[in-house]
Image (tube, rainbow, N blue to C red):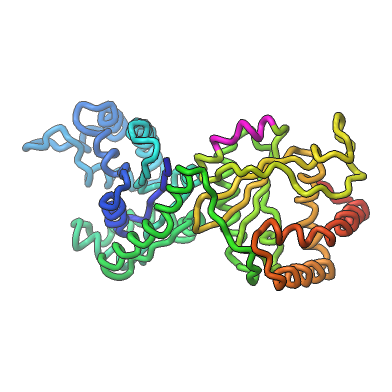
Amino acid sequence: MLRIGLSGGIGAGKSTVSSTFSELGGIVVDGDVIAREVVEPGTEGLAKLVDAFGHEILHAGGPDAGSLNRPALAAIAFSDEEKRQTLNGIVHPLVAHRRSELIAAAADDAVIIEDIPLLVESGMAPMFPLVVIVHADEDVRVKRLIEYRGFTEQDARARIAAQATEEQRRAVADVWLDNSGSAGQLVEQARALWHERIQPFAHNLRENQWATAAPTLVPYDDTWPEQARRAVARLTTACGHRAVRVDHIGSTAVPGMDAKDIIDIQVTVDSLEVADELRDALTSAGYVRTPFTADVAKPDARSTVPGFDHTGEALWDKRLHCSADPGRPTHVHVRVAGRPNQQFALLFVDWLRANPGVRADYLALKRRVAAEGHATTGAYAEAKEPWFLEAYRRAWEWADTTGWRP
């Protein structure tokens, strides 16, 4: 099952995207629809709202008598932050419970589109392997809310101001859909996303396949740290207390360094048994297990880990998961705390950041090896190993001199 988080500010057009995904075969779990369902007459939700905000939030007469008067509730609940939090505290748990019921009823190979208006505000974004944000400028959204939903301009701007900012949404967005044009243009964007990324992602998860990336060196991308932060948040959520720490490692973590367009993340755990326990959680987060179980061993005169032969490969064992998402190749190295491969992954990044000469030397090596045209990422990595044998010693000498600790 692939779960996708879909959100956007009020009036941005996410309903158009969710409808498109539904037509293409996705199962849409709509937060707005559920939010209405859990406060229908006779529900626990409506009773709690009346207790909190009074009977004036109900329709007093006519065919809707006794049902929720949404404009009246909005006028009260959005008048200040405390009341808005009270509203969210009542409705959000009820919506979450109903959402869980709907997802549990779906097929194992389904693509679930969770349309959540307050995805960012609720902190739920890291729960999803892919987050899609639909965006339009504020003035465009205000115009739509006035024309199509009967808002006053003041009410429209108040609702927009009460939601996440553009900056906050960009921070969690794996995909940013711009809806400043026509509805037809947005539909085409959504269809392309479905066919080019979502369907292949779902297929890879079903087949336990990871997205491959050519070992092509590309210039440093200023967005790599931001993409890594999303991956770290996602992995931290998936691993929970079983992760000692989660770090962005590798060349994409070194500012200005050319690298393969693959984000490397290290998840530190207490043992390989814990690493194996995380397999299903990481798969649900979009990262499938690979057969690779060890790093290429490097000289290890430093290790004092009891119970292991310093010359054996056990010290370099790990578990490797790779992203099934073709839009963001990512390698997740699950390593044991205190072992040389776990420590060196952290040390190497700090060593390069602190030493421009070493950074330039390593960049020259990477460019030379890339020019040799190695066909696979593994072959590319092996070609750099002779340099690493010396770099390993030099890096630890630097660590001793500076007092560096992981």
- Judged by its main secondary structure, the magenta piece is helix
Q: Residue at (83%, 65%) from the top-left corner?
A: 355
What residue range appears in magenta? Answer: 273-281
Q: Residue at (53%, 57%) from the top-left corner?
A: 328
Which one is in front, 2 or 289? 289
Q: Position of residue 279 (x, y in %)?
A: 58, 36
Left or right of residue 360, residue 46 in this image = left
Q: Position of residue 114 (x, y in %)?
A: 36, 44
Left or right of residue 194, residue 339 in this image = right
Q: Position of residue 265 (x, y in %)?
A: 65, 50
Which one is in front, 29 or 283? 283
Queried whether the magenta region covers residue 131, the answer comes back as no
Q: Residue at (55%, 52%) from the top-left corner?
A: 230
Residue 278 shows in the view: yes
Residue 267 shows in the view: no
Q: Residue at (46%, 56%) from the top-left corner?
A: 169
Residue 3 occupies which quadrant of the picture?
Answer: top left
Quarter of the picture holding the N terminus: top left
Left or right of residue 19, residue 399 in this image = right
Q: Is residue 382 above or below residue 116?
A: below
Left or right of residue 36, residue 337 in this image = right
Q: Position of residue 60 (x, y in %)?
A: 12, 36
